[in-house]
Image (spheres, coloured by chain):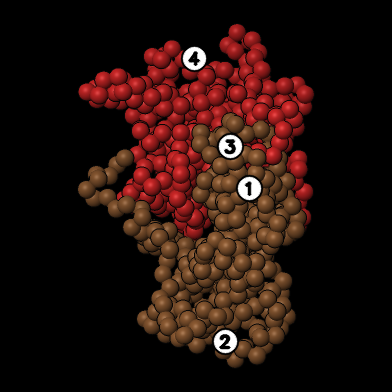
Chain colours: A brown, B red
Amino acid sequence: MSEKENNATPMGKLGKYGLIDHISGKIELQNRSTVKGIGDDAAVIDSNEGYTLVSTDLLLEGIHFNLIYTPLRHLGYKAVIRAISDIYAMNGTPEQLLIGLGISSRFMVEQIDEIITGAGLACNKYGVDLAGGDTTSSLTGLTISVTSLGNVEKTKLVRRDGAKPNQLLCVSGDLGAAYMGLQILEREKKLFEEDGHIQPDLTGYDYIIGRQLKPELPVEVLTKLKNAGISLTSMTDITEGLASDLIQLCKASGTGCRIFNKQIPIDFETSRAAEELNIDPLVPALNGGEDFEFLFTVPLEMYEKIKQISSVSVIGHMTEKGSGNYIVGADGSEVELTLPL
Amino acid sequence: MSEKENNATPMGKLGKYGLIDHISGKIELQNRSTVKGIGDDAAVIDSNEGYTLVSTDLLLEGIHFNLIYTPLRHLGYKAVIRAISDIYAMNGTPEQLLIGLGISSRFMVEQIDEIITGAGLACNKYGVDLAGGDTTSSLTGLTISVTSLGNVEKTKLVRRDGAKPNQLLCVSGDLGAAYMGLQILEREKKLFEEDGHIQPDLTGYDYIIGRQLKPELPVEVLTKLKNAGISLTSMTDITEGLASDLIQLCKASGTGCRIFNKQIPIDFETSRAAEELNIDPLVPALNGGEDFEFLFTVPLEMYEKIKQISSVSVIGHMTEKGSGNYIVGADGSEVELTLPL
């Protein structure tokens, strides 16, 4: 350890985004081909005719997945979804994927096959090539790195920093389902640990457990928007949770925002599971994460058009810089959105 | 765990390259832009005017580095070297880099700064932009993923599979130094653990410890070869060890090889440290790894030209497929090269 304790800043003080800001403040770009570096869903590289997009994610056992209730095939599938989501979130098309696997000796080859089979299924579904990677042994848990590459026409790139005050803030699909699916899986795991004879009862939770274990990307929504002639002014994917991802979008764009409690799309099954577990369904919708939906802005004039697109909800609008990021309750009360610690 | 024990194949049975073969057998490529997938130093992607090259590496605490004697700044530096080495090994120019960091809570922000500072120094030196990445918490050790991107003119790409029988097999620089540097660091660590008052004595080992802690890439050798009009028929970088990397090159090219014991370049300091520790210096040279040198083949007619290039050694030649991969001793004895377990 090269730093003295008395100069040290604990990681928790910065948080994930604080750390990324902190790091990116130290970086100077040198190459003309680097159009956009740290601070969006993917890096943007000029490849003359278009832009190459590239993004990387790190998935660690115990943090991003628990092998007790995550089938390895699903884990491989979800790793691919997570990686290519970043390419779609720049309005690009993913084409290649690289996977790095850190594998402890307790693993069997057949288990790695399951991960690769799952990854392959997702690659096939989304038209992506598994084009490379790395394998290494691991002394600790299973480690997965996924890097996705894609491309986009230069005029079609949608960045995180393009939103303007008064533009409409929209999300695809519904939110909080994957988180509630995880809570149900956790509950059944605990019951099983207390009494090994209890079989997990997951009936009635198909949708939310599916959203946790085998998420899909709402690519068809992006196609519908394009076909309707609706151009997006900014976009990101919802992986950390609506609140976090929205705050990042506002920060990048130099705006504030107001979203409306009532407009946040939450599936009935999500609400029901939340009620059972005594959780306000807004909590998973705002902070659950792993939704794999798209958060984007469109010009105000698009309101009539966007209303026609199924699976899209207008949840609020962008405001002037410095006016804060607020969620408005049914009673008109305003609460500031904050990053979860 | 989803597999029954009785069908299971332990990872050790396959080894790293066996696993990669096993995985790549399951992959079908879909996109026309994917020129070359798994099985070379980097994936090759058609970007119309040239090829985009991309490669990813995973570095795990306890496997790839030991924080007891690896300063974090050096760790960041070396991670970049490892990543961009793959791009040079395709005869490309690295331009962008993405870093993923999995960080346990015992880390301080200043320590992450050290890693990023080290990575930044390497990026500056080699003209690469740190263009993105991911950060996450880790329950176990420090995890680093590095993904590098670069490009190459289509006619200049040098793959691993281009070697032909009778072509000359060459390496840049010298081999085994990084491994012997590590052995010296390990020795001093043990002495320190036995008696906390002993200061590590690393005098006389500057070169080999430098090769372990702050490796550089012999990019100037590639420039010299180009300026001399020597075109390479195949190339890879030596990261796993000469034996492993050479076997991979022969396998990809569908050839055998013969290398000559006496021609393998070993620095005096490497030999001296090996003697002190009662190791045959050929062992680190063949199997040590982390040399960050280039292994390549050139046509036989280039012999006179290649002799003129300093820092390049002709170590043998390629043979017909099926004739095996052999190292020839001073007495003419032949030993088959094998992958270390």
Q: Residue at position x 49%, y 51% from top? A: B100
Q: How many numbered marks are there?
A: 4
Dot 4 falls on a residue whose secondary structure is: loop
- Same chain assignment for discs 3 and 1: yes
| Chain identifier of the residue bearing label 4 in the image | B
**Along the horizontal axis of the image, is A141 left or right of A14?**
right
Going from the N terminus, do you reach mark 3 or mark 1 first? 1
Q: Quadrant of the N terminus of chain B?
A: top right
SS for dot 3: strand
Q: Position of residue A328 (x, y in %)?
A: 47, 82
The residue tagged 2 is A299
Chain letter behind tag 2 = A
Bin the neighbour count of mark 4 within 10 Å (Cα to Cα): few under 14, some 14-19, many 20 and up: few
- Please name the amino acid that badge 1 sits on: Thr
Which residue matches tag 1? A70
Using the image, determine if residue A63 lies above or below residue A332: above
Whether residue B136 sits left or right of residue B305 in the image: it is left
Marker disc for residue A103: 3
Residue B41: x and y in percent read: 61, 42
What residue type is disc 2 on?
A: Pro
Q: Residue B144 versus residue A156: which sits nearer the camera?
A: B144
Looking at the picture, do discs 2 and 1 lie on one chain? yes
At horizontal 29% and vertical 53% (from top left) the residue drawn is A9
- Report the residue at 41% width, 46% height from top: B104
Between the C-alphas of marks 2 and 3, the distance is: 47 Å
Please report contact status of discs 4 and 3: CB closer than 8 Å, yes or no.
no
Specify whether residue A269 is in view.
yes
Residue B120's spot in the image, x, y percent?
A: 40, 52
Q: Which mark is residue B280?
A: 4
Label 4 to label 1: alpha-carbon separation: 47 Å
- Mark 1 falls within which chain? A
Provide the secondary structure element on which disc 1 rests.
loop
